[in-house]
């Protein structure tokens, strides 16, 4: 383990924003994490844990210690006739885990294919896509206390999961280093194809009775058709959360906008943020070196040379226009530093 100073983070965030860390360290094992917790640089500075860098926007240099999570490993830890239980280290790439599970015939996370980032971010964000959220398969989250170094575990019921939300974004924020997640997956696949464009994509693939890999491949195809590759165009995927409103509030909107798309979420109504942004004229629009992706209005992009502050200002202008037109305040999904 080596702590270095003034480390560039440009290659470690998918926006490709040029920012630097005052102190930087890579953690490759639990032993190295224990060693780090005893270091002066750890206790004397603010700390930021960095995974895949796909859900973060650096608007300035980072004052403090950036910890790059490189914990790797995935294994089967329990099995019966119906389910398998797997343990996955938090530094693993999430999409590679989906591929691993589906290749083994284990179902439950195939709708979450191609979501960027590391496994450690999945419970923090309660990642979700196409009608599925990680909370449905997650059993527990292994953590290390950032003050005492003690190893602990959060059961799923203790994680306070909500829409793109969890205890790790609120009262436990910054208190723990997530080291692993435990998932329970099914050996019996029941296709979840009723959300978004999955049914249409399967039809285009000439698949009438989708198997596990068919659903995964359909999701991958949909995401690749709409979302830019960060290696080609800097972005962090969906920048905003889809707003959730009461049924009464939605009915008022619907009286003026009969074609407004929506999805039932419990007793509330979810409205696609991308549709709202598109109605405000932002889709495909370029502002300096920043812009809104031409195929998906939820995605803000760095066309090259944009600063994090410029991208933040673009997001604020979008929020203001949606608020003015629809009376809805968009919340950011991306963490801004």
Image: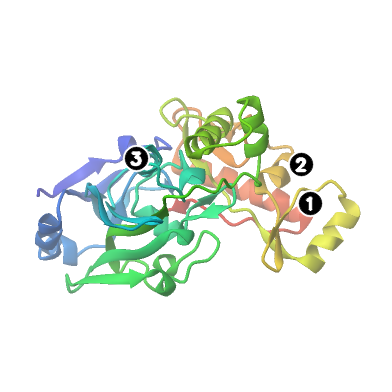
Query: Sequence-wise, which precedes: disc 2 or disc 3?
Result: 3
Disc number lying in front (2 or 3):
3
- Give percent across and percent down for residue 56: 42, 48
- Disc 3 is placed on an element classified as helix
In which quarter of the view is residue 227 placed?
Answer: top right
Q: Nearer the viewer, residue 119 or 205?
A: 205
Pointer 2 local density, CA inside 10 Å: few below 14, some 14–19, many at least 20: some
Q: Which residue is mark 3?
A: 100
Residue visible at 70% across and 69% down?
A: 267
Left or right position of 122 against 267: left
Residue 284 appears in the picture as rendered: no
The picture places residue 42, in percent across and down from the top left corner, at: 17, 62
**Gap in Å between the C-alphas at discs 2 and 1?**
9 Å
Label 1 element class: helix
Quadrant of res 252: bottom right
306 or 183: nearer the viewer: 183
Instruction: From this view, report whether residue 95 is shown above or below residue 252.
Output: above
Real-space CA distance between mark 2 and mark 3, rounded to the nearest whole angstrom = 39 Å
Q: Of discs 2 and 1, which sits in the foreground?
A: 2
The residue labelled by disc 1 is 325
Residue 194 position (above or below residue 137) = above
Residue annotated with mark 2: 279
Residue 239 point in image, percent of width and height: 54, 46
The image quadrant that residue 145 belongs to is: bottom left
Q: Report whether residue 106 is seen.
A: yes
Neighbours of disc 3 within 10 Å: few (<14), some (14-19), many (20+): few
Q: Are marks 1 and 3 in contact (CB under 8 Å)?
A: no
In the shown orientation, is residue 13 left or right of residue 41?
right
Query: At x 39% / y 66%, what residue is drawn?
Result: 168
Between disc 1 and disc 3, the foreground one is: 3
Q: On screen, 225 above or below 9?
A: above
């Amino acid at each position: 383990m080596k702590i270095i100073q003034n480390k560039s983070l440009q290659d470690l965030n998918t926006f490709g924003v040029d920012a630097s860390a005052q102190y930087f360290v890579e953690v490759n094992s639990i032993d190295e994490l224990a060693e780090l917790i005893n270091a002066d640089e750890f206790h004397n500075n603010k700390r930021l844990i960095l995974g895949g860098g796909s859900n973060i926007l650096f608007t300035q240099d980072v004052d403090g210690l950036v910890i790059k999570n490189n914990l790797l490993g995935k294994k089967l830890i329990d099995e019966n006739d119906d389910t398998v239980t797997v343990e996955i280290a938090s530094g693993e790439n999430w999409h590679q885990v989906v591929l691993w599970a589906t290749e083994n015939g284990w179902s439950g996370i195939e709708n979450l294919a191609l979501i960027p980032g590391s496994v450690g971010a999945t419970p923090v964000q309660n990642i979700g896509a196409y009608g599925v959220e990680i909370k449905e398969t997650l059993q527990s989250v292994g953590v290390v206390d950032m003050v005492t170094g003690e190893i602990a575990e959060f059961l799923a019921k203790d994680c306070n999961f909500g829409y793109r939300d969890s205890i790790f974004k609120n009262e436990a924020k910054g208190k723990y280093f997530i080291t692993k997640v435990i998932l329970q997956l099914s050996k019996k696949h029941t296709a979840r194809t009723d959300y978004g464009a999955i049914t249409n994509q399967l039809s285009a693939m000439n698949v009438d009775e989708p198997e596990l890999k068919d659903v995964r491949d359909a999701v991958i195809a949909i995401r690749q058709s709409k979302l830019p590759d960060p290696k080609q165009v800097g972005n962090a995927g969906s920048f905003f959360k889809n707003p959730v409103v009461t049924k009464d509030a939605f009915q008022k909107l619907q009286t003026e906008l009969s074609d407004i798309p929506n999805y039932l979420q419990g007793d509330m109504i979810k409205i696609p943020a991308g549709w709202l942004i598109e109605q405000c004229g932002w889709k495909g629009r370029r502002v300096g070196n920043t812009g809104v992706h031409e195929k998906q209005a939820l995605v803000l992009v760095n066309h090259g040379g944009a600063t994090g502050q410029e991208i933040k200002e673009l997001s604020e202008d979008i929020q203001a226009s949606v608020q003015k037109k629809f009376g809805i305040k968009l919340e950011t999904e991306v963490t801004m530093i």
